[in-house]
Image (tube, rainbow, N blue to C red):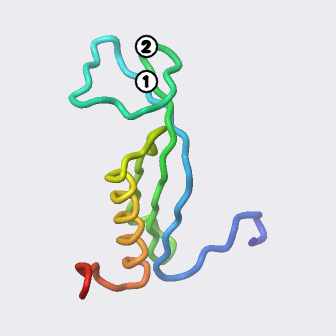
Amino acid sequence: MDEEGAPIRPAGRWVSVRLQHRHVSFDEEFEADEPLPDGDCADEESLSYSGIVITSYNEGAKVSERWIPLGVDPSEADDERLIGQLRDALLWQAGRPPQAAGE
């Protein structure tokens, strides 16, 4: 930690992965284009659910942030999407371009 109590961050490229809980409210007229993710409904106009935030930094500056929702009962496709996002983030951190499987 530095003098101000904040953790020291590495120089260069690095990736932060953390669990985050979000609460979303919507208007009475809101109609979803697709099914809402599994989560806890506080009332008919809101939804709370967890997700993973992947944040990429370069020389201390945030360059991207992705939020991947975690359903109560994730499917294999959900798991594969998360694995792909983590893989891409770590390859970016290493400075290597993504490659197709088997290359």
Residue at the farthest bottom position? 103
Vertical position of residue 92 compared to residue 86: above or below? below
Q: Check disc 1 and report its element: helix, strand or loop.
A: strand
Residue 45 % position (x, y): 42, 16
User: How many discs appear?
Assistant: 2
- Which mark is in front, 2 or 1? 2
Vertical position of residue 52 compared to residue 91: above or below? above
Query: Toward which corner of the image does residue 98 lie, by quadrant?
Result: bottom left
Query: Toward which corner of the image does residue 69 lie, by quadrant?
Result: top left
Going from N to C along the chain, the mark reached first, 2 or 1, is 1
Mark number, residue 67 = none
Q: Check disc 2 and report its element: helix, strand or loop.
A: loop
Dividing the image into 4 quarters, which one contains the C terminus?
bottom left
Label 1 Cα neighbours within 10 Å, binned few <14 / some 14-19 / many ≥20: some
Relative to 54, 19 lies left or right: right
- Residue at 37% across, 85% down: 95
- Residue at 39% across, 58% down: 82
Does the residue at mark 2 contact the one at mark 1 (Cβ under 8 Å)? no
The residue identified by callout 2 is 44
Dividing the image into 4 quarters, which one contains the N terminus?
bottom right
- Residue at 52% across, 62% down: 17
Tell me which amino acid carries mark 2: Glu
Vertical position of residue 90 compared to residue 5: above or below? below
Relative to 84, 44 lies left or right: right
Residue 66 % position (x, y): 39, 55
- Residue at 69% across, 68% down: 7
Rounded to the nearest whole Å, what is the CA distance between mark 2 and mark 1?
A: 9 Å
Label 2 Cα neighbours within 10 Å, binned few <14 / some 14-19 / many ≥20: few
The residue identified by callout 1 is 25
Residue 25 % position (x, y): 43, 24
Tell me which amino acid carries mark 1: Ser
